[in-house]
Image: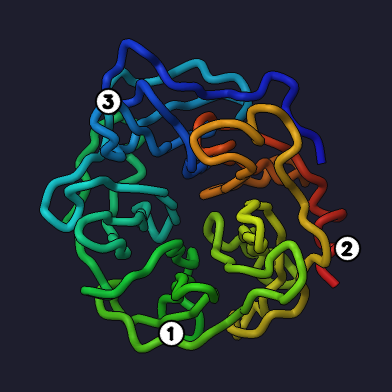
């Protein structure tokens, strides 16, 4: 694992009231020869909105928009739209996010690939698949499996799996993976970015929280045909708070990812650091798969 020496790659901008305090927890996609970031931001009103930036190489940001590209639109989101995750299905990116109103719950919307490339933020209808249910950390798989769409989400403290025929109505869910007592992921766990399909199965990066409230990242391999079955899981975290920008901030001792991309057999993971800034680290795919015992 190698942290980018230029971290953090994104920091708050004082002159932008909507992102003047914190930027963190960013989706990350590869599209049109660029890496695109959709990041959570908070400003003077402490309401979460989603901003946009992009890069040719995933490290050096050369485009960042001055205004949010997605923000609250109803009472279910009155305190913010948090922690976006984007999955390409067909020619549209399905975005899951946390809608923060009187409770936290999963929100879903979508946008076309063409609209992202043209920076035309024509998001589709928003819907909330688990109404009146405290729920976070939702990700959708990039294709149907067994004739159904598949979602991972969190009923604390577990990662759960749900299925749907239309992306709108989701069935009752089963627990897929639990915290491990006495370990780095002992208190609760949650999916990071959408699972990535490899020859040996689905690679899932996930976050784990220990009893001291430290957030770390690990990985798991899920069965390709039955992703509710965990085939391997890292014994140790692949990334944990060590640098000053990861240890000190709005929430100390946090690395929290909402997305990653594969570039030339390396996995680039973007992550919020201490809920204040955004960093990126690179990993050897072979090494991560080896550690998923």
Residue 20 falls left or right of residue 61: left
13 or 4: which is nearer to us? 13
The residue sitting at 50% across, 16% down in the picture is: 62
- Residue at 66% across, 35% down: 247
Horizontal and vertical percent for residue 281? 71, 37
Q: Quadrant of residue 88?
A: bottom left
Which residue position is annotated with label 3? 44
Mark positioned earlier in the residue sequence (1 or 3): 3
Q: Judging from the image, what secondary structure is the residue with disc 3 in? A: loop
Residue furthest out toward the front: 212
Q: Quick one: which residue is furthest to the left in this view?
A: 74
Q: Give the CA distance from mark 1 to mark 3.
A: 45 Å
Instruction: From the image, tell me which residue sits under label 1.
Output: 147
Q: Which residue is identified by label 2? A: 290
Instruction: Identify whether 94 is placed above or below 6.
Output: below
Residue 112: assigned label: none
Name the side, left or right, on which 99 lies relative to 255: left
Q: Nearer the viewer, mark 1 or mark 2?
A: 2
- For the N terminus, the image quarter is top right
Return the residue found at the far top.
Answer: 15
Q: Please give the name of the residue rendered at 27% of the width and 25% of the height, measured from the top-left corner.
A: 44
Q: Earlier in the sequence, mark 2 or mark 3?
A: 3
Check disc 1 and report its element: helix, strand or loop.
loop
């Amino acid at each position: 694992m190698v942290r980018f020496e230029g971290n953090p790659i994104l920091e708050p901008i004082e002159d932008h009231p909507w992102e003047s305090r914190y930027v963190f927890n960013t989706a990350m996609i590869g599209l049109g020869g660029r890496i695109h970031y959709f990041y959570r931001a908070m400003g003077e009103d402490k309401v979460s909105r989603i901003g946009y930036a992009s890069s040719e190489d995933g490290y050096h940001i050369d485009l960042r928009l001055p205004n949010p590209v997605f923000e609250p639109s109803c009472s279910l989101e009155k305190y913010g739209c948090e922690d976006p995750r984007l999955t390409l299905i067909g020619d549209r990116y399905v975005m899951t996010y946390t809608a923060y109103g009187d409770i936290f719950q999963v929100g879903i919307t979508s946008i076309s690939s063409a609209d992202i490339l043209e920076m035309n933020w024509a998001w589709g209808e928003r819907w909330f698949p688990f109404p009146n249910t405290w729920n976070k950390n939702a990700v959708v798989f990039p294709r149907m499996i067994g004739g159904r769409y598949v979602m991972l989400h969190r009923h604390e403290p577990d990662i759960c799996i749900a299925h749907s025929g239309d992306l709108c109505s989701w069935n009752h869910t089963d627990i897929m993976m639990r915290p491990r007592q006495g370990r780095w992921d002992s208190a609760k766990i949650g999916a990071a970015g959408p699972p990535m399909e490899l020859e040996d199965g689905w690679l899932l990066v996930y976050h784990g929280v220990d009893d001291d409230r430290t957030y770390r990242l690990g990985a798991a391999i899920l069965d390709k045909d039955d992703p509710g079955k965990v085939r391997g899981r890292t014994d140790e975290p692949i990334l944990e708070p060590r640098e000053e920008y990861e240890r000190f901030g709005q929430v100390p001792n946090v690395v929290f990812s909402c997305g990653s991309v594969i570039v030339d057999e390396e996995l680039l993971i973007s992550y919020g650091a201490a809920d204040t800034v955004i960093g990126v680290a690179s990993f050897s795919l072979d090494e991560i798969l080896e550690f998923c015992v």
